[in-house]
């Protein structure tokens, strides 16, 4: 193999039942995607998944697509399979910027007396060890101070605590997913910042474990960065619905990809890209 040739994403057809989520889906987006998929009868961008040691897969990106196709009764799905141990597959954690939630910040910060006033640096330090072991389940940084919610117990209990916090403001205010973990930077970029909700560092072993738990992380917290992201694959749902063995479907998909390659329809763009029309 020519080392100068770009590697290609690994596209595989797998049973829907073997795809496990690590995060909750967004019911509104699932419903909207279901209508779009039903009308187009085409899966444009495949979810990203990593194999687990029992023959199942953890979905790293695409929980809403997977769930929408599951609701449509599609028995098999195309996923981009990645090696989760590859250092190129990176795991990051989003923070949630809330721009206009005044009452909610006060309510959450005083809820049941569980939250404790802290220095912002202490909040970040309490989240750094990772969700499995860190002393804080969540932190809130506001213009008037920072607060931390103590954590403890097994991973399932910690995931449940994070989910309850996010549920407290979901639907009540607009949520912006940001990478910045200081309020000043976020306020400068978005023009206003009432609160920044920060979460524990996530780990790949933790994501694998959560995939097998009934408790899931809220949507919009985990962020996976995958090299060679496969987009606009445009797989006909008729292929995924066909009553054929997986190996036959896989051969048909491979042949279609090969035909596109020979027709110069496959492009690899190594440059980082910013889209302004999503």
Image (cartoon, rainbow, N blue to C red):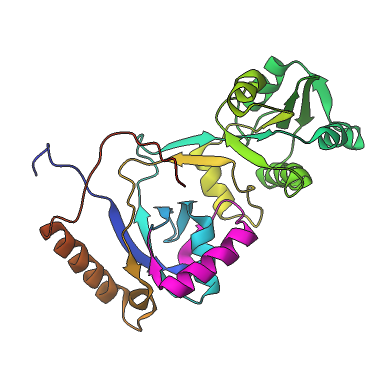
Taking depth in this image into account, of 14 and 268 the one nearest to the observer is 268
Residue for point 49% across, 61% down: 65
Q: Please, is residue 238 above or below residue 149 in the view?
A: below
Residue 38 pos. (x, y %) = 48, 74
Residue 249 pos. (x, y %) = 28, 74
- Residue 135 falls inside the magenta stretch: no
- Relative horizontal placement of residue 163, taking residue 180 as reference (left or right): right
**Going by the picture, which residue comes out furthest to the left?**
2
Q: Please, is residue 236 above or below residue 143 in the view?
A: below
Residue for point 59% across, 37% down: 177
Taking depth in this image into account, of 68 and 138 the one nearest to the observer is 68
Q: Please, is residue 114 above or below residue 15 in the view?
A: above
Residue for point 62% across, 38% down: 176
What stretch of residues is rendered in magenta? 17-44
Residue for point 83% across, 37% down: 104
Quarter holding the N terminus? top left
Residue 274 pos. (x, y %) = 40, 36
- Relative horizontal placement of residue 9, taking residue 181 as reference (left or right): left
- Relative horizontal placement of residue 197, taking residue 105 as reference (left or right): left
Taking depth in this image into account, of 42 and 275 the one nearest to the observer is 275
Occupied quadrant, residue 25 = bottom right
- Relative horizontal placement of residue 178, taking residue 159 as reference (left or right): left
Occupied quadrant, residue 232 = bottom left
Number of marks in the rendered image: 0
**Going by the picture, which residue comes out furthest to the right?**
112
Residue 266 pos. (x, y %) = 20, 53
Occupied quadrant, residue 79 = bottom left
Q: Please, is residue 32 above or below residue 264 in the view?
A: below
- Residue 41 falls inside the magenta stretch: yes
């Amino acid at each position: 193999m020519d080392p100068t040739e770009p590697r290609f994403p690994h596209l595989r057809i797998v049973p829907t039942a073997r795809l496990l989520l690590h995060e909750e889906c967004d019911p509104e987006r699932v419903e909207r995607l279901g209508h779009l998929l039903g009308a187009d009868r085409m899966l444009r961008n495949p979810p990203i998944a990593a194999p687990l040691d029992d023959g199942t897969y953890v979905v790293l990106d695409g929980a809403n697509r997977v769930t929408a196709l599951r609701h449509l009764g599609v028995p098999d799905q195309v996923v981009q399979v990645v090696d989760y141990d590859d250092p190129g597959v990176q795991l990051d954690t989003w923070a949630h910027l809330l721009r206009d939630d005044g009452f909610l910040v006060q309510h959450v910060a005083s809820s049941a007396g569980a939250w404790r006033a802290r220095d912002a640096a202490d909040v970040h330090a309490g989240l750094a060890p990772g969700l499995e072991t860190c002393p804080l389940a969540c932190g809130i940084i506001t213009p008037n101070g920072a607060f931390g919610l103590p954590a403890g117990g097994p991973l399932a209990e910690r995931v449940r605590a994070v989910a309850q916090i996010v549920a407290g403001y979901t639907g009540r205010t607009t949520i912006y997913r940001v990478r910045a973990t200081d309020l000043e930077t976020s306020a400068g970029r978005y023009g206003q910042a009432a609160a920044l909700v920060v979460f524990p560092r996530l780990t790949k072993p933790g994501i694998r474990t959560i995939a097998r738990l009934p408790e899931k992380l809220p949507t919009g917290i985990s962020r996976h960065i995958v090299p060679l992201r496969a987009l606009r694959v445009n797989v006909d749902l008729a292929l995924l619905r066909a009553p054929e063995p997986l190996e036959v479907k896989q051969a048909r998909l491979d042949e279609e990809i090969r035909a596109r390659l020979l027709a110069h329809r496959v492009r690899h763009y190594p440059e980082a890209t910013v889209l302004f029309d999503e």
